[in-house]
Amino acid sequence: MNIRTLTLLASLSFAGFTQAEPASQQSVEDLLVATGAADLGAQMMAQMLPAMKQSMPDAPEAFWTEFQAQADFSVLMQRIIPIYQKHLTEEDVEAINQFYRSDAGQRLVKVQPQIMQESMMAGQAWGQEAAQKAMMKVQSGAQAGQ
């Protein structure tokens, strides 16, 4: 083999290792808007707030009012964008954005909050059932050992 052939083979071998263009901040922002991520975050906060209040019963109502005022989702979105950029290319985000612009994508955005809420309820029921089964097994084992 001559040097030209080796150079060509080496360049072709390494061509597959070049990194794709990372997603731009604007395309990720478009994705977060298209998916309703900011709205979903606010809805999740509203759903989680009662449990948070229950876990901190001594916190005054003024704390919770201020907590909600401080929960600026635009700040959170700016922290999330680099995470998307780390894992997705511009090509990936554009393809995902195309889906969310479609009728099926828009339908998913509309029903996603209900899916999340019902999934959380299903997860809670599943966790309670697993805990009950574990407790029964432990108790029956403890009784057998007596």
Image: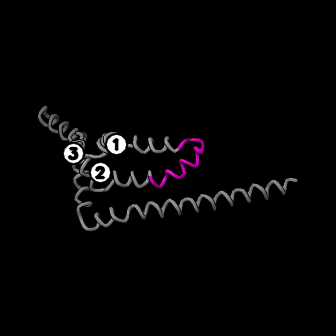
Is residue 20 visible from the viewing direction of this image?
no
The residue to which callout 2 is attached is 32
Mark 2 → mark 3, Cα distance in angstroms? 10 Å
Residue 47 lies in magenta, yes or no?
Answer: yes
Marked residue nearer the N-terminal end (1 or 2): 2
The disc label shown at residue 62, or none? none
Q: Residue furthest top?
A: 3
Q: How is the image coloured?
A: one colour
- Residue wearing tag 3: 26
Identify residue for label 1: 80
- Residue 144 shown left or right of residue 82 in the figure: right
Question: What is the CA distance from the residue labelled 1 to the residue labelled 2?
Answer: 9 Å
Range covered by the magenta-colored residues: 46-60
> Which quarter of the figure has residue 71?
top left
Q: How many marks?
A: 3
Q: Residues within 10 Å of mark 1 (few under 14, many from 20)?
A: some
N-terminal-most mark, 1 or 3: 3
Q: Is-magenta flag for residue 5?
A: no
> Disc 1 marks which amino acid?
Ile
Q: Secondary structure at mark 1?
A: helix
Task: Tell me the residue at 15%/34% (across/down).
Answer: 7
